[in-house]
Image: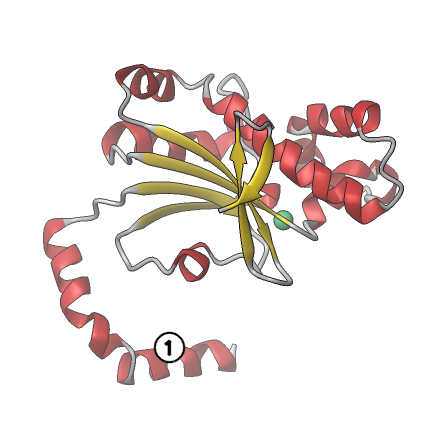
Amino acid sequence: MQKLVEGVHRFQAGEFGRYRDLFRKLAREGQKPHTLFITCSDSRVLAELITQSQPGDLFVVKNVGNIVPPAQVVGSTNSTAAAIEFAVEVLRVSDLVVCGHSQCGAMEALLHPSRRTGSMPHLEEWLRVAEPVRQIIQTEYQHLAHEAERSTAAAEENVLFALENLHSYPSVQQRLAEGSLYLHGWFFKIATAELFAYDPGMRQFTPL
Ligand SMILES: [Zn+2]
């Protein structure tokens, strides 16, 4: 905690100076982010840092495994849906990025149900949403010998699963039909900070 408090004081005394006018403007005029950025809660994936974004630029949703449930999944398992509706319908973001990442603990947990302990019912329920991803890995990626490779494949397939599920939201459907919203699937490699984007034409992730 001490580290956090010190950081707050250091920010207010130093770096905040550079942002003072921007924060004032954002407080006065409200936010108008251009992008809804959905990524993993993982502490190593920082949307603003890796895209060099400023306050007011990104509307960020972080959840375990950057899972986007289909619109039909309701209740406690779908707070992400609320953020999607708000960002797309009210904030009218022009772009929507789903960004998975390497070494994702959620993908590892998804692929290995037997390793999960029984004391996390909410996590269990949440990972069940992405069960189709586990099935794809089981049926189509058995040729991958290493666990790390299967985990990367799961992270990528999970991004595609999220993009597919986004189409189940009426607000997204409408904006896509209008041609005023663009969907993007990204993959972030932690060790090198490289970003890859899904190319639907090539059907693979290529360097951004
Ligand atoms: Zn993760």
Of 184 and 107, the residue lying toward us: 184
Of 138 and 111, the residue lying toward us: 138
Relative to 43, residue 138 above or below: above
Image coords of residue 162 (percent x, y): 55, 29
Relative to 78, residue 172 above or below: above
Q: Which residue is mark 1?
A: 8
Q: Is residue 32 visible?
A: yes
Relative to 75, residue 120 above or below: below
**Quarter of the image holding residue 151?**
top right
Instruction: Identify the residue at image location x=21%, y=78%.
Output: 17
Amino acid type, callout 1: Val
Image coords of residue 22 (percent x, y): 17, 63
Relative to 53, residue 58 above or below: above
Instruction: Identify the residue at image location x=36%, y=29%.
Output: 182
Q: Secondary structure at mark 1?
A: helix
Left or right of 52 in this view: 165: right
Left or right of 167 in this view: 138: right
Instruction: Identify the residue at image location x=45%, y=35%.
Output: 184
